[in-house]
Image (tube, rainbow, N blue to C red):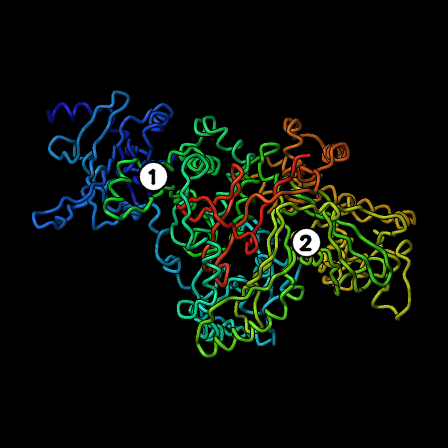
Amino acid sequence: MAADIGELLVPYMPTIRVPRSGDRVYKSECAFSFDTPESEGGLYVCMSTFLGFGREHVERHYRKTGQCVYMHLKRTIKEKTTGASGGALPKRSPGVFLDLEQVKDINSDDYEYEDEAKLVIFPDHYDISLPNIEELPALVTIACDAVLSAKSPYSRQDSDSWEEELKNSKHENLQQLDNGVRIPPSGWKCAWCDLRENLWLNLTDGSVLCGKWFFDGSGGNGHALEHYRKTNYPLAVKLGTITSDGADVYSFDEEEAVLNTNIAEHLMHFGIDMLKMQMSENINPFNDMKPRISEWEVVQESGMKLKPIYGSGYTGIKNLGNSCYLSSVMQIIFSIPDFQRRYVGNLQRIFDYSPLDPTQDFETQMTKLGHGLLSGQYSKPPVKSEVIEQVVKEEYKPQQQGIVPRMFKALVGKGHPEFSSNRQQDALEFFLHLINLVDRNNSGSDDPSEVFRFMVEDRVQCCQSRKVKYTHRVDYIMQLPAVLEAASNKDEFIVYETKRREAEIAKRPLREVVRAKIPFSACLQAFQEPENVNDFWSSALQAKSAAIKTIHFASFPEYLVIQVKKFTFGIDWVPKKLDVSIDMPDLLDISHLRATGLQPGEEELPDISPPIIIPDRPKGHLLNHFMESPEIDESAVMQLAEMGFPLEACRKAVYYTGNLGAELAFNWIIAHMEEPDFAEPLSLLGYNEVGHNEVGLAGGASSMQNQPPEEIVAIITSMGFPRNQAIHALKATNNNLERALDWIFTHADSEDESETASDVDVQSQVNSNAEAEPAGPRIKDGPGRYELFAFISHMGTSTMSGHYVCHIKKDGRWVIYNDHKVCASEKPPKDVGYIYFYQRMPF
């Protein structure tokens, strides 16, 4: 028999591998479903790729790859047998499945595992039981042992503390500049642009600069990295992550997230006292005081007998350890028909054409998660016999299966300093990160993230000249301020706050909580209020001026996402959460926020600056720039160009601001970067007419030879697009990455254009196409009338701690999704939510 088995395996020996260091062995989860060895059909592990497959997916892998040898793993969970004395017999050895995640929803003291492993040869399904040392060839035995003893590919992800994965930075003894910089607890803005999110504090000089969008996933222009390249100041900490326990630190020099044991000392240098934060938190320890216990009760609907719901669309997601932020977002995402159609509706095609390693494919894993939530396969009610048995034992607690999204979490968090960790994260940041991934992995009309996308119109009016400027930008969320001053119970709330502070000092709990009751209308009114811009550079005045900024919706999305701005920092840098109640409406009409554009009687800020003052001339001496040779500070030009702006735009910025330095030129760029001719060469017709045509031609040649920033070209080519197509798209969209990607998708027919065409001809064609079909993000505009269909609530004092729960309206009723528990909601806490999802009402 031994010889027979050995001969049977001979043809397949070249396809049987021994796992090497670095190989991921997926022996606990199917690549296409949430089947495990505990599932009815068990799990098949390919002995060549070490990918795991459930019974319904292993045949596809066999047909696709020709791989014939799989290890079949099956685990049976049994109730422990009892001895003569009535006690449970000693638990048997877990068997052959080493390092396999155990079921945590049952009492392991009452159950035991019976494991079975065997080799299966396709297509005849010939079985060889394991272990079988005598009959199997030595190589096969070694390979089987290595697979069975391999570590889980998620062991790093599931570790108790993410910090264990990080190494100490070599820059812990950082030399900091004594420049007197003090960082306030709020109101941060990038020093190089207007971004107010994804900001990083450089620990050497205290500069606050934005991160890179493709690094962090939440938006940025890469100014923090650019600052490092100029200064070699290596460490930066992300603002918003600083707590008494630490902060997220990134080392540009080491190119990874790091630990900094001296972080408290380094932050103190800029006035951020982590020790004081610790003391402030200790005054009010949650476990002793529980000042917000009612918030937990209200959000989770504690004390109510919530009826479990099973079936399609009612599948829970098991918590991987602080992964509730992911669960809440994904439950809502796959309650939207566009995402259901895009992924689950295309399941067969996506699975059939998935890459050889589907665990690393975003489309496959989104489809897998969507199918797991919507199929109902992992949300089945207990059979009647089990219920009766548990009732007899007076231990009946309905168990809901749910799915375990380890593979999905590992993929979407890969390379991200926060979402790759096992710590709690902000649900809103994860939502934006996910939308970014969906957008990058889809094209054209297939992009379901378009349902959230809308255009914002920013109107800025110079207070001195009264002239205006209109610009448009893409956004995905509406941030609604919580206006405490407008609380209807303001007097009662002030009295409560006094009592609360006294109770904190005395370390005694309060019997009740009083929340500020804020009318939604007051929050909406505050959203519409004009914003003062103190450092606005007026192109009309050619100087800084005060300005007023207002925002309106240039388009209304199909699904409107509203974030209530509950989280802030006190003057002592201690994170604070506004415990407020807002009467969020079920029906919302924001049609009055529709943008109107330039109004009659309004005068736009000029595109071209008036005559300028040359610094080396006596004050007041004006130079007509049409008559004299243009003098441009090339060092300032290069300083701006290194930030990623087009070279010709930098030249114009320096020229039109009178060579007064890079800072003023930068302000000119920000004010003009949305203009159609932003990246066009500096054109001075009057100057050319006085006999200096050769210089003008040189400037034109420079423009012809000027290529888009190589870094942006590399991003597009890394997505699989040809280099020449990336360059054409960037030139057509003034080097705007998002618009360039959209241009590529809307100009698919031009991919076969000859690469040998002259730059002049190509540029002419690009400009012609751009005029005929304006480049820009795809927007689904419509009426501004909405109905609330879901919301995410947060419990705790910070987005980086606590717990997230979501409520979704399905089939005419509200349902609460609390990790793996899915129940009919009795009293949805719509007034204390954090993120609200509205869907457009039918016409």
Question: Mark 2 is on which residue type?
Answer: Ala
Q: Which residue is mark 1?
A: 29
Proximity of marks 1 and 2: CB atoms separated by less than 8 Å: no
**Side (left or right) of 734 relative to 163:** right
Q: In front here: 552 or 636?
A: 552
Q: Nearer the viewer, residue 278 or 397?
A: 397
Give neighbour class at mark 2: few <14, some 14-19, many 20+ (Cα, 10 Å).
Answer: some
Question: In x, y percent, where is residue 460?
Answer: 78, 56
> Of the residues under marks 1 and 2, which one precedes in the sequence?
1
Q: Is residue 450 left or right of residue 12?
A: right
Q: Secondary structure at mark 1?
A: loop
- What crowding class fits label 1: few (fewer than 14 Cα within 10 Å), some (14-19), or many (20 or more)? many
Q: Nearer the viewer, mark 1 or mark 2?
A: 1
Q: Residue at x 78, y 60 (%)?
A: 548
Q: CA distance from mark 1 to mark 2?
A: 49 Å
Frontmost residue, 485 versus 408: 485
